[in-house]
Image (cartoon, rainbow, N blue to C red):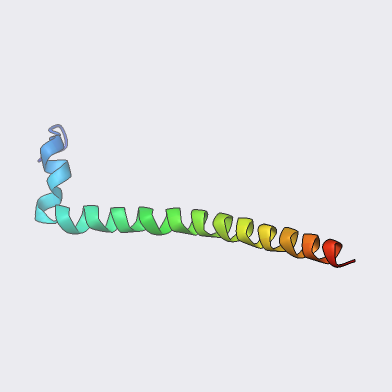
Amino acid sequence: MNGSEFSWSEFFAMGGYAFFVWTSYGLTFAVIALNIIMPVMHRKKVINRVKRAIRREQLQQ
């Protein structure tokens, strides 16, 4: 493939390393997504725990 020719099939094949390249892209995307999603979920759980604790304290008084 010289500079003037471009083939999408060659691009996606990655010179025979497509499985490894696309797998690494997929894993990277999954890790980044989890790094965004997990803290949000944890924050919601913590907020709910604090709200329950506040309600419990108010009921005990």
Q: Nearer the viewer, residue 32 or 60?
A: 60
The residue sitting at 51% across, 54% down in the picture is 36
Q: Is residue 9 above or below residue 13?
A: above
Would residue 18 be found to the left or right of residue 59 on screen? left
Quadrant in which the N terminus appears: top left
Percent x, y for residue 35? 48, 59
Quadrant of the image occupied by residue 17:
bottom left
Percent x, y for residue 6? 15, 34
Q: Nearer the viewer, residue 10 or 40?
A: 40
Q: Is residue 31 above or below residue 5?
A: below
Percent x, y for residue 54? 80, 62
Residue lying at the far top of the rendered structure = 4
Q: How many discs mark residues in the rendered view?
A: 0
The residue sitting at 19% across, 59% down in the picture is 20
Percent x, y for residue 39? 56, 59
Q: Nearer the viewer, residue 12 or 32?
A: 32
Quadrant of the image occupied by residue 61:
bottom right
The residue sitting at 16% across, 37% down in the picture is 3
Residue lying at the far front of the rendered structure = 60
Q: Nearer the viewer, residue 3 or 13?
A: 13
Would residue 18 be found to the left or right of residue 44 on screen? left
Would residue 10 be found to the left or right of residue 33 on screen? left
The residue sitting at 15% across, 36% down in the picture is 8
